[in-house]
Image (tube, grey):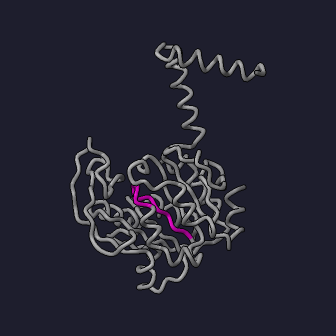
């Protein structure tokens, strides 16, 4: 065995043998923090690369974007600021949050560049029980994930993205942002026609620990999209486009961006 390999083996043995010692526990805590930061785990819009992604795409001069899971409108407001010719259709399923969304985006007067919808998008039309958390409205979901929080069940109205676009005569989307607490894959399937035709140029979705319960993995997104889209993980200054490997299934909350292979210009903007 070579020297470096032997040292690693000895270090692993020492760490696992003394894993209850304060020194090893402190080292593990530090290593976990570094790994989390290196993997860009987290949902801070200003730090995790989501805001930078909008800025990088500004030269594309987008005209239409969907914000699915709009919450209070932070993403919508930033997209309209970064893309001055872009109209945003915002979808927020919880009525209480929708009221604040409307107040936020209309604060400076009626905004003709935003269309507000108090319903959600999914893979079917109808209603579904969802859970609203008054103290944390940003985690509204169709699964009661946060059992330690006060929740209010409600009947949410749902549509599919394809049906919504058909009803409004929308043919092509520049950007589809999805942040719906574990239901991202179902939203994406609701855009099946447009994704198959590559009439959605960019898709952003969140992946994380909820996949351990929904059983929807990164592998499923790659099976659905990788023939037609490049798929990459969003980092603070760029998007790392990679082919799928099973080791990518780390269940850390992070965001991914998919770019139509008809738009290599967009991929180049994001990968730089």
Compared with 122, 238 (above or below) is above
Figure label count = 0
Quadrant that contains the N terminus: top right
Q: Residue 236: image x %, image y %?
A: 61, 48
Measured as percent of width and height from the top left, residue 107 is found at: 38, 65
Would residue 108 appear left or right of 87 to someone viewing this image? left
Figure check: 58 above or below 8: below
Instruction: Determine whether, in the image, residue 220 is placed left or right of residue 137.
Output: right
Magenta stretch containing residue 178, yes or no? yes
User: Outermost residue toward the right?
Assistant: 2
Residue 23 coordinates in the image, percent (x, y):
52, 14
Q: Is residue 104 left or right of residue 231?
A: left
Which residue is drawn at the image coordinates 51% and 25% (left, top)?
Answer: 29
Q: Which residues are magenta?
A: 175-184
At a point 58% along the width and 42% down the height, the residue shown is 39
Judge left or right: residue 214 versus residue 30. Answer: left
- Tell me: residue 2, above or below residue 110: above
* Residue that appears at 59% across and 63% down: 258
Q: Residue 146: x and y, percent?
A: 30, 46
Asked which quadrant contains residue 158, the reply is bottom left
Q: Quadrant of residue 152?
A: bottom left
Q: Nearer the viewer, residue 215 or 180?
A: 215
Q: Nearer the viewer, residue 50 or 27?
A: 27
- Quadrant placement of the C terminus: bottom right
Residue found at the far front of this picture: 1
Q: Residue at x 32, y 65 (%)?
A: 93
> Does the stretch in magenta take in 117?
no
């Amino acid at each position: 065995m070579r020297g470096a390999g032997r040292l690693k083996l000895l270090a692993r043995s020492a760490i696992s043998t003394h894993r209850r010692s304060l020194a090893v526990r402190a080292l593990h805590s530090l290593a976990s923090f570094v790994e989390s930061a290196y993997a860009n785990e987290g949902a801070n819009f200003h730090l995790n690369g989501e805001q930078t992604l909008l800025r990088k795409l500004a030269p594309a001069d987008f005209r239409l974007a969907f914000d699915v899971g709009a919450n209070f409108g932070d993403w919508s407001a930033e997209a309209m600021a970064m893309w001055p010719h872009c109209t945003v259709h915002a979808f927020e399923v919880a009525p209480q949050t929708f009221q604040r969304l409307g107040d936020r985006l209309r604060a400076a007067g009626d905004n003709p560049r935003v269309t507000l919808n108090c319903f959600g998008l999914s893979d079917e039309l109808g209603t579904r029980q969802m859970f609203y958390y008054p103290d944390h409205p940003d985690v509204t979901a169709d699964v009661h994930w946060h059992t330690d929080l006060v929740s209010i069940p409600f009947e949410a109205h749902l549509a599919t993205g394809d049906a919504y676009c058909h009803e409004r005569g929308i043919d092509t989307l520049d950007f589809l942002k999805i942040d719906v607490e574990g239901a991202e894959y179902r939203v994406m399937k609701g855009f099946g026609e447009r994704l198959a035709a590559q009439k959605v140029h960019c898709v952003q979705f969140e992946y994380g620990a909820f996949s351990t319960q929904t059983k929807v993995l990164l592998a499923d997104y790659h099976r659905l999209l990788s023939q037609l889209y490049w798929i990459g993980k969003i980092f603070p200054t760029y998007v790392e486009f990679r082919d799928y490997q099973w080791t990518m299934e780390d269940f850390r909350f992070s965001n991914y961006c998919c770019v139509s292979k008809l738009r290599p210009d967009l991929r180049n903007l994001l990968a730089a």
